[in-house]
């Protein structure tokens, strides 16, 4: 007994191909973005370590001249900016997009169910 022939539907395959290609391109763009972010974070971490070392050397100097104090303040400001950049690299609004809409959807459903129950109860 021969298995039944499968019908070949080329239009269905053609419709799936562009979707797959678009998804693949999206994944590739995301990967490039992640690689760039990783490189930036590594560079910022190295810069942070250098500035912290320089700051410590200036603090260890027994003769704190006004120039050294000004350098320390400048390094501290740069470290603060760098900390903000590092933190912002780990946090993005895109990461909140899905949980936000889930909260809106399920919260909205909860309100609707509450109204229905309230109207049924009295």
Image: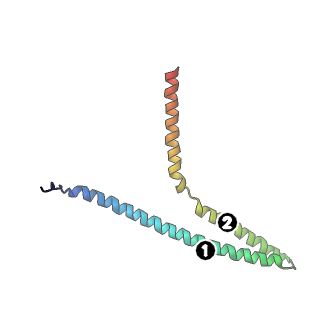
Task: Where is residue 76? Give x, y as percent.
Answer: 75, 69
Colour scheme shown: rainbow
Residue designated by label 2:
83
Q: Label 1: which residue?
A: 43
**Where 9 sits versus 89, above or below?**
above
Q: Residue 42's quadrant in the figure? A: bottom right
Q: CA distance from mark 1 to mark 2?
A: 12 Å
Left or right of 24, for residue 77: right
Tag 2 or tag 1, which sits nearer the N-term? Answer: 1
Q: Position of residue 70 (x, y in %)?
A: 80, 73
Tell me residue 73's x, y (percent). 78, 70
Q: Residue at x 67, y 66 (%)?
A: 83
Give the SS element for disc 2: helix
What residue appears at the point 26 percent right and 59 percent down from the top-left corner? Answer: 14
Residue 10 shown left or right of residue 85 in the figure: left
Relative placement, left or right, of 15 versus 92 is: left
Q: Nearer the viewer, residue 46 or 79?
A: 46
């Amino acid at each position: 007994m021969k298995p039944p022939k499968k019908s070949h539907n080329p239009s269905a395959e053609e419709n799936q191909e562009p979707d797959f290609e678009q998804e693949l391109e999206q994944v590739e763009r995301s990967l490039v973005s992640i690689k760039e972010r990783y490189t930036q974070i590594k560079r910022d971490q190295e810069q942070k370590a250098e500035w912290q070392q320089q700051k410590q050397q200036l603090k260890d100097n027994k003769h704190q001249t006004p120039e050294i104090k000004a350098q320390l303040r400048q390094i501290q400001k740069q470290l603060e900016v760098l900390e903000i950049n590092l933190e912002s690299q780990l946090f993005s609004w895109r990461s909140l997009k899905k949980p936000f809409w889930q909260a809106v959807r399920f919260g909205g459903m909860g309100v609707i169910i509450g109204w229905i129950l309230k109207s049924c109860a009295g």
